[in-house]
Image (cartoon, grey):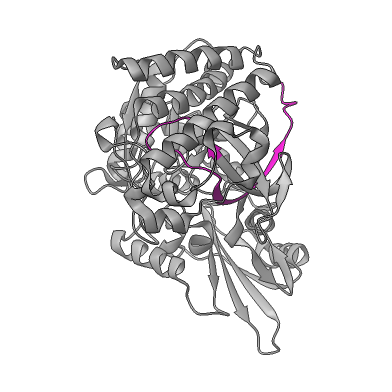
Amino acid sequence: MWLPTSGKHRDFIERYLTLHDRYTAGELGEEEWRTWAQRQLREVVALAQDGSPFYARHLAGVPAARLTLDDVRSLPFTTKDHLRTAMSDVLSRDLDEACFFYETTGTTGPATPCPRDPREVIASNAHVTESWRNIFTDVFGDRAPRVGVMGPTEVHSLGDTLGDVARNVGSAVAKIWPYSPVIGFPKALQLMRDLALDVVFCTPNVALSLARAAREQGLDPRRDFAVKVFLVTGEMCTPDLARQIDQAWGARTYNALYGSQETLVIASACAHGRLHLARPNYIAELVDPDTGAALGDLGTGELVVTMLIDGIKPLIRYRTGDLVELSGNVCGCGIRGPVMRVVGRTRDRIVLGGHSFQAWQIERAVLRRIDHSYGYQVVIDRAEDGEDLITVRLDLPDGRVPGLEAAHAARVADALGVRCRVELPSELDPVTTTGAFVSWKAARIHDRRAPIDHETAAARRLAGARGHRA
């Protein structure tokens, strides 16, 4: 693993990697973790108060040197709106200390700066490296697979992060952006074939769009490609959606990691298909998404994280806007840390027939007992009698199955409690390809009961700007 030559960075990283090695070996006890976390909490808060104009105001009067882990819940939240308003004032160190500069995609507001220094890079990548080793050993044995990485933009951290992780596990890596005007889908598919890529890291939508584009070129994704593993991230992927990817490619699909440009990698996957919290890097809390009331460390709620690495942009009590379930680790995979299941964004709740549904419940209802689909969209209307009516549009490349529309409409209606009809268009609305760039809801749900919100408008602009998926 690469280490920086700077003494101040190297001292921290050597101390961190010693702790990480004990953690991954199962030797780090609870009391030792608490000692580490409390020390880092104090350092992060003191650094932020001294170096960040935003946190100097936001945490004014907080006694950093005396903070305990029990005091965390008394600190104020940091929100996405804070980051969009404060911009570079959130940074706790000078940009001169950064080794990379990234920013968020900026599709629904100003792109916020996310520079990283060596401390943050090494600490975050160490957990992803452990994840890849766990999965690759299970699938490929002693052979280091060839990896293709498909990220959203050139100023996104994905390419650098996963390039470093690939080097750590001994894999060759090719950075391929299928939505780039230079690459495009035909070139991406050509490179996947020519390089005989074993693993592809992308969003669920890109995995399915690649399969559709391959078929349009007369190729069989299962026969003409070597891909055995899809590592997906960036948007919700329920087991039902992962099954569509597996069926299209004859591969195994993993929800590879959970995090963001702002928070780095919070959790990464194991060979059993579960996400594990990178516990040396975060204090994780669960709160009520509506009231902010504390819900404890385990259970279901909105995830709030305090970053324990005193890098350029540590965030303190950051509300992620994501609903997650945290549970104890009884996985048996060898990866440490609580098990995390991402339920969906707090804003992605949808009311149908007077009942509130999470995103995963809708996706499960739409794809349950559906095979070989390349995508879906749900259109919501208000019928003449005032009741909700949904139309499920499915992209099924193998054509119609007699009676499928009526049978599946009945299943969806039963699951969601509203009337339903099913359509099988030759091609879905291009907005369905924008999920990772904006949101699952903007990409998958067309709610005609209310005016278009800013996220949906952003998704439609993006879909129009880049045209057809392939």
Judging depth in this view, the residue of 108 and 148 nearest the camera is 108
Residue 219, x across and y down, in percent:
39, 40
**Can you say whether 208 is above or below 117 in the image?**
below
Judging depth in this view, the residue of 378 and 327 nearest the camera is 327
From the viewer's perspective, tell me whether residue 324 is left or right of residue 166: right
Q: Quadrant of residue 146?
A: top left
From the viewer's perspective, tell me whether residue 142 is left or right of residue 167: right
Judging depth in this view, the residue of 338 and 144 nearest the camera is 338
Q: Tell me how many marks there are.
A: 0
Judging depth in this view, the residue of 26 and 427 nearest the camera is 26
What residue is drawn where x is 44% and y is 13%? 14
From the viewer's perspective, tell me whether residue 465 is left or right of residue 233: left
Residue 74, x across and y down, in percent:
63, 46
**Can you say whether 278 is above or below 210 in the image?**
above
Magenta segment: does it hold 405?
A: no
Residue 280, x across and y down, in percent:
57, 25
What residue is drawn where x is 34% and y is 30%? 117
Residue 160, x across and y down, in percent:
33, 31
Q: What segment is highlighted magenta in the picture? A: 306-332
**Can you say whether 205 is above or below 47 in the image?**
below
Q: Quadrant of residue 418?
A: bottom right
Residue 122 seen? yes
| Residue lying at the far bottom of the rendered structure | 384
| Residue lying at the far left of the rendered structure | 182
Magenta segment: does it hold 318?
A: yes
| Quadrant holding the N terminus | top left
Residue 335 seen? no
Q: Quadrant of residue 410?
A: bottom right
